[in-house]
Image (cartoon, rainbow, N blue to C red):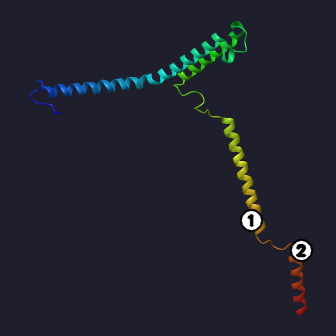
């Protein structure tokens, strides 16, 4: 019970099973490749979102509700409605032509900003170097002023002369 009786199976059942499973596997692989190639799953969700946004905007305009509730009639609200529809459509087109990545995810290189940051880093490093040099100079013993050295030399010379 629960197992297939080999005597009751059709002739060449093992070959039919093999080629059927191989064909199904090939079809699944080809379908997946087709979906990945054209990004059909991503496009479907993106288009579905746009359609729902457009429907919501249309129903709000039709009922003068949501952001249109402050208007007395459809003629007054039409400019805001048109602007909203164009905004939704523009975002959809931008997303479609940027391969679904959107503007906010890819950061553009700001040359001026990078140069300013680099300049500030260099100034900071220079200031740190100068401060370190000043600290090192302060910590090192300073030689006596030249006048003290001259006085000692004169004192020593006088002692030498007195002994002579």
Q: Residue at x 57, y 14 (%)?
A: 55
Find numbered disc 2 in the image and state the secondary structure of the residue it sits on.
helix
**Number of callouts:** 2
- How packed mark 1 is, by other alpha carbons closer than 10 Å (few <14, some 14-19, many 20 or more), is few
Q: Can residue 133 be seen in this view?
A: yes
Judge whether residue 164 can be spotted in this image.
Answer: no
Disc with the residue nearer the chain's start (2 vs 1): 1
Residue 150 location, x and y as percent? 88, 77
Residue 3 pos. (x, y %): 16, 33
Q: Residue 59's spot in the image, x, y percent?
A: 60, 13
Mark 2 or mark 1: which is in front?
A: 1
Image quarter in which the C terminus is found = bottom right
Q: In this view, does 158 lie to the left or right of 1?
A: right
Image quadrant in which you'd find residue 133: bottom right
**Residue 147 image label:** 2
Foreground of the two, 78 or 120: 78
The numbered disc on residue 160 is: none
- Indicate whether 112 appears above or below 149: above
């Amino acid at each position: 019970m629960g197992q297939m009786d080999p005597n009751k199976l059709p002739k060449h059942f093992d070959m039919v099973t093999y080629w059927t499973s191989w064909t199904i596997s090939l079809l699944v692989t080809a379908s997946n490749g087709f979906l990945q190639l054209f990004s059909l799953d991503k496009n479907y969700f993106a288009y579905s979102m746009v359609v729902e946004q457009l429907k919501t905007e249309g129903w709000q305009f039709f009922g003068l509700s949501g952001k249109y509730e402050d208007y007395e009639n459809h003629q007054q609200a039409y400019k805001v409605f048109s602007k909203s529809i164009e905004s939704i459509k523009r975002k959809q087109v931008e997303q479609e032509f940027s391969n679904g990545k959107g503007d906010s995810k890819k950061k553009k290189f700001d040359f001026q900003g990078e140069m300013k940051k680099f300049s500030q880093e260099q100034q900071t490093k220079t200031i740190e170097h100068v401060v370190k040099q000043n600290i090192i100079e302060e910590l090192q013993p300073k030689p006596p002023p030249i006048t003290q050295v001259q006085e000692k030399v004169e004192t020593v010379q006088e002692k030498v002369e007195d002994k002579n």
